[in-house]
């Protein structure tokens, strides 16, 4: 079956530091890949996505590249801000799963001023 | 544009009580989902409805039932609540277009925080 593995958190950084959150996946077929963000007390919202190999998704300074050869979709940001403090979820959707989203366990990011 | 609306936002139940969590979306999406979120477990799919009139079990369906009342509404029912069902519940919806919805994002409600004592 499908699965998503994210790096264990929590991650604590100082403002303007570089961020990487690792994500690897196992899936049938050729999945679409997503990063969702959950701010405190809120539901999840889409941060970025990539739908085929070598695609790069980007939004709000965050980027992730769909690497089929390493089955990875690592999230990066060059300079984090306090407002980026949230839980980040990697997810995939594949035809073999009837297009259901499968999530990783989430990574809590705290950015200190 | 409200998106996905869940009610209630908070609920405390006694063991053995029943309740229904309501979810409605106004985006004309075909697919709807119920997830539960627990610390260290991420989001786990309880049930989903690929289209109006169909429902299927997800990863953790035991102890729950669902009803896809119409295209807009998808409810989750706990018939006899147990402490293990203490969790935050999220409803989500997504469109099905192009490759059956392969590339479309899911939109989430604000969540229902349920405590069973």
Image (cartoon, coloured by chain):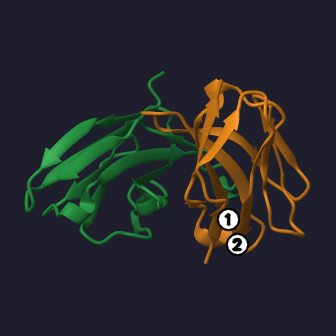
Provide the residue designation for mark 1.
A94
Return the residue found at the far bottom.
A1
Where in the figure is residue B25, as x and y percent of width and height?
42, 36
**Residue at the image point whose x is 57% and y is 53% from the top:** A106
Q: Position of residue B100 (x, y in %)?
A: 65, 57
Tell me the residue at 50%/37% (across/down). Answer: B28
Classify the position of the N terminus of chain A by image quarter.
Answer: bottom right
Chain letter of mark 1 equals A
Residue at (46%, 46%) from the top-left corner? B92
Q: Is mark 2 on a helix, strand or loop?
A: loop
Q: Which of A110 and A45 is in front in this view?
A: A110
* Disc 1 + disc 2, Cβ < 8 Å: yes
- Seen in the image, is B47 located left or right of residue B84? right
Upstream in the sequence, badge 1 or badge 2?
Answer: 2
Residue A61 quadrant: top right
Q: How crowded is mark 2: few (under 14 residues within 10 Å), some or many (20 or more)?
A: some
Task: Please give left or right for residue A82 compared with residue A78 in the image.
Answer: left
Q: In this view, does A87 lie to the left or right of B37?
A: right
Looking at this view, is B75 or B10 the one in front? Answer: B10
Chain identifier matching the orange colour in the rendered picture: A
Q: Is label 1 in a helix, a strand or a loop?
A: loop
In which chain is the residue bearing label 2? A
Give the crowd class for mark 1: few <14, some 14-19, many >=20 residues within 10 Å: many
- Rendered hue of chain B is green
Residue A37: image tag:
none
Residue A27 numbered tag? 2
Q: In this view, does A109 lie above or below A27?
A: above
Judging depth in this view, the residue of A62 and B76 nearest the camera is A62
* Residue shown at the point (20%, 59%) measured from the top left: B78
Residue A108 point in image, percent of width and height: 57, 46
């Amino acid at each position: 079956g499908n699965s998503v593995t994210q790096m264990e958190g929590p991650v604590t950084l100082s403002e303007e530091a570089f961020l990487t959150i690792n994500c690897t996946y196992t899936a049938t077929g050729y999945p679409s890949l997503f990063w969702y963000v959950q701010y405190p007390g809120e539901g999840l919202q889409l941060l970025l996505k990539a739908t085929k190999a070598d695609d790069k998704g980007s939004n709000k300074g965050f980027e992730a590249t769909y690497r089929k050869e390493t089955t990875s979709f690592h999230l990066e940001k060059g300079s984090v801000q306090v407002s980026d403090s949230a839980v980040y979820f990697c997810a995939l959707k594949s035809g073999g799963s009837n297009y259901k989203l499968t999530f990783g366990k989430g990574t809590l990011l705290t950015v200190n001023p | 544009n409200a998106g996905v609306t869940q009610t209630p936002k908070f609920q405390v139940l006694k063991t053995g009580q029943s309740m229904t969590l309501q979810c409605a979306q106004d985006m004309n999406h075909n697919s709807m989902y119920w997830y539960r979120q627990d610390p260290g477990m991420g989001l786990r799919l309880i049930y989903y409805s690929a289209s109006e009139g169909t429902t299927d079990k997800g990863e953790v369906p035991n102890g729950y039932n669902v009803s896809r009342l119409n295209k807009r509404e998808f409810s989750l029912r706990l018939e006899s609540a147990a402490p293990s069902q203490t969790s935050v519940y999220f409803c989500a919806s997504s469109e099905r277009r192009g490759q059956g919805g392969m590339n479309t994002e899911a939109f989430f409600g604000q969540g229902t925080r349920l405590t069973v004592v």
